[in-house]
Image (cartoon, rainbow, N blue to C red):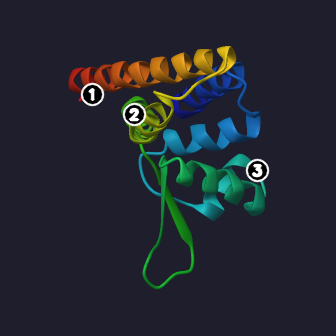
C-alpha cells in the first residue's frame, strides 16, 4: 500500500539521521495524512500511548510543524502537519539566526566601544579582535540570510 511504503521510507530516513524511531513514526504518520487526524486515532495507528504521542506532538507543535485544535462540541484534539517541511525549516532557521544576529549587532558595538581605548592585556587584545571579527561575521551572515530569503521565497 502506498501510504505504508511512504511512511517506511520516511522512517528509514529519519532514523538514519539519529531521530528516535517512535518520533519518526509519529512524524511520518502525520506527514502523509492529508486531513486532520485525532490524537486518539494517531495513537491507535502507531500503537503508542496517548501520553507518548502527546509528548511528541508537543515538540512538533513547538517547532511549528503541527497545528492542534478542538472541534466544536467535542473534547477530541485534532492535529494537522505542515507539508512544506523544507520551507518551514528554512524559515525557522532564518528566524533563529536573525534573532541571534540582532543581539550580536546590538550588544557587540557597545562592548567594542567600551573597550576600544582601554589598556588590554595580550589575551584581552586577542579576545577584543575575536569580538570585532564576530561583528563582521554577523554582518556577513545577515547579508547571506537576506540573499537566501530572496532565492527561496
Comes first in the chain, label 2 or label 1: 2
Tell me the tag on residue 94.
2
Eyeballing the image, is 14 above or below 72? above
147 lies left or right of 87: left
- Between 109 and 103, the one lying in front of the other is 109
Screen quadrant of the C terminus: top left
Residue named by callout 3:
47
Do residues under tags 2 and 1 come within 8 Å of each other at their CB atoms?
Answer: yes
Furthest residue to the bottom? 73
Please state which of the two labelled residues, at mark 2 or mark 3, is closer to the viewer: 2
Q: Position of residue 66 (x, y in %)?
A: 50, 51
Do residues under tags 3 and 1 come within 8 Å of each other at their CB atoms?
Answer: no
Graded by Cα atoms within 10 Å as few (under 14), some (14 to 19) or many (20 or more), the crowding at tag 2 reads some
Comes first in the chain, label 2 or label 3: 3
Residue 148 appears in which quarter of the rendering? Answer: top left
Residue located 32% across and 19% down the image: 144
Q: Position of residue 57 (x, y in %)?
A: 62, 54
Eyeballing the image, is 88 above or below 143? below
Residue located 76% across and 50% down the image: 47
Comes first in the chain, label 3 or label 1: 3
Residue named by callout 1:
149
Please state which of the two labelled residues, at mark 3 or mark 1, is closer to the viewer: 1
Q: Secondary structure at mark 2?
A: helix
Q: Secondary structure at mark 3?
A: loop
Structural distance between the alpha carbons of marks 2 and 1 = 8 Å
Q: Position of residue 112 (x, y in %)?
A: 46, 31
Q: Position of residue 76 (x, y in %)?
A: 57, 73
Eyeballing the image, is 55 above or below 127? below
Amino acid at each position: 500500500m502506498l501510504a505504508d511504503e511512504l511512511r517506511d521510507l520516511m522512517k528509514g530516513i529519519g532514523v538514519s539521521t539519529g531521530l528516535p524511531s517512535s518520533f519518526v513514526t509519529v512524524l511520518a504518520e502525520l506527514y502523509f495524512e492529508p486531513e486532520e487526524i485525532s490524537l486518539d486515532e494517531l495513537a491507535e495507528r502507531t500503537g503508542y500511548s496517548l501520553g507518548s504521542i502527546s509528548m511528541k506532538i508537543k515538540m512538533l507543535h513547538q517547532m511549528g510543524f503541527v497545528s492542534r485544535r478542538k472541534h466544536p462540541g467535542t473534547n477530541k484534539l485534532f492535529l494537522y502537519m505542515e507539508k512544506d517541511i523544507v520551507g518551514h525549516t528554512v524559515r525557522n532557521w532564518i528566524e533563529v539566526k536573525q534573532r541571534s544576529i540582532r543581539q550580536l549587532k546590538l550588544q557587540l558595538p557597545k562592548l567594542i566601544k567600551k573597550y576600544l581605548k582601554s589598556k588590554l592585556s595580550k589575551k584581552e587584545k586577542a579576545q577584543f579582535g575575536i569580538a570585532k571579527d564576530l561583528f563582521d561575521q554577523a554582518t556577513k551572515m545577515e547579508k547571506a540570510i537576506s540573499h537566501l530569503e530572496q532565492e527561496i521565497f
